[in-house]
Amino acid sequence: MNAAAGSAPGGRLDAALDSPIIGMSPWIIFSVLVGPGRYELAVSLALAVAVLLVVLGRVLRRGRSVKILEVSDIAFFAVLAVIGVMASPGTLHWLETYAGELSNLALVLIAFGSMAAGTPFTLQYAQERVGREYWDSPEFRRANQVITGAWGLAFLVSAIAGGYGDLVLHNPNNLWTGWVIQIAAIVMAVSFTEWYPQVVRSRRSDGHPPPVRHLLTPLAGLLIPMGVLALVFDASASWFGVALIILGVVLARAIGKDAEMTRLRGGHSREKRQGRRLR
C-alpha cells in the first residue's frame, strides 16, 4: 500500500484489510466469545465478520487476491454454524465446551500447514503492502514464516490453556484459562506482527532495531485489568491480584518515562541536524 492509497476515501479501511490481524479477527472473536450458552452468538458473529471481510475486500479492490485465511474463515465457521443448527442438545453442549479449542487447533494447523507448503498465510497479506519486486526476496519470505509461526504458537497456547480449563479444571469459564491466558497470547501475537517487521527493516538499513520492551509493552498494559478481574471474580489469592495491579502501575510509569526520554532524544537529534545544516 502506498501513501496515496492510504489517504484516498476508504483507504484506511483498504489498508486494514491488508493486515493478517484483520484476517484472523473471526477466529479471535470466536475463541474469546465461545462458551456455555454462547455458541450460537460466537459462531454467528465469526461467520458474519468472515463474510463481511471478503465482501469488503472485493468491493474496495477488485484485483485483491483470494487468501487462504479468508477461505478457511468462511468454510470453518459455515460448517460450525450448520452443525450448531442440526445438533442435538448433547452435541451442542459438547460444542459449547470444546469448540474454542477446536478453532484454536484449526488455526494452528492452517498456520503451520501453510508454512510447510511454503506459503505462510501472512505472506498473501504482506504482498498486498509491498512492491512485487520484494515478493521473492528470501528475507521477505523468511519474515512471513516467522510471523505466521508466532500466530501458530499463540493459538497453540490458547488451545492448551482452554483444554486445561475444560479437561482438568472442568471449568470452561475459568478466568485464567478461558480468558486471560488466551487474550494475552493473542495480544502478544498482534504486538509481534507489528514489531518484527521493524526489526527486519532496521537490519536492512543498518539502523537500530526497536527494543524488546516495545514488544512487551501491550502485555504490560494488561496487568492492571488482569489484577482487577482477579480480585473482582476471586480468581486467585488477593495478594496476587494486588501484585499484578502494582506491577502494572510500575511498568506503565517506567514505559511512560522511557517513551518521554526517547521523544526528547529524538528532538535533540533533530535540533543538532538542523544546526549543522544552518552552519
Image (spheres, grey):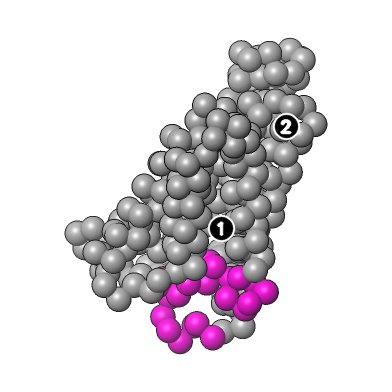
State which region is magenta.
114-136
Q: Residue 215, image x and y in percent?
A: 62, 50
User: Which image quadrant is residue 45 in?
Assistant: top left
- Identify the residue at image location x=54%, y=86%: 136
Q: Name the residue carrying label 1.
A: 193
Please tell me the numbered disc located at residue 143. none
Q: Residue 98, image x and y in percent?
A: 64, 39
Front tag of 2 and 1: 2
Cα distance between the residues tagged 2 and 1: 28 Å
Extreme-right residue of the structure: 168
- Is residue 77 shown to the viewer in this render? no
- Identify the residue at image location x=43%, y=84%: 132
Q: How many C-alpha atoms fall within 10 Å of the one at disc 2: few (<14), some, or many (≥20)?
A: many
Mark 2–mark 1 CB contact (< 8 Å): no
Query: Is 174 drawn above or below residue 31 in the view shown?
Result: above
- Residue type at mark 2 is Gly
Q: Name the residue carrying label 2.
A: 165
Residue 181 in magenta stretch? no
Residue 115 in magenta stretch? yes
Query: Is 218 drawn above or below residue 166 in the view shown?
Result: below
Return the residue nearer the eye: 203 or 229: 229
- Is residue 83 shown to the viewer in this render? yes
The quarter of the picture where the C terminus appears is: bottom left
Query: Is 187 drawn above or below residue 41 in the view shown?
Result: below
Residue 203 shown left or right of residue 169 in the figure: left
- Identify the residue at image location x=67%, y=74%: 116
Circle count? 2
Mark 1 lies on a secondary structure that is: helix
Return the residue nearer the eye: 173 or 87: 87
User: Which image quadrant is residue 145 in?
Assistant: bottom right
Return the residue nearer the eye: 74 or 248: 74
- Residue type at mark 1 is Thr
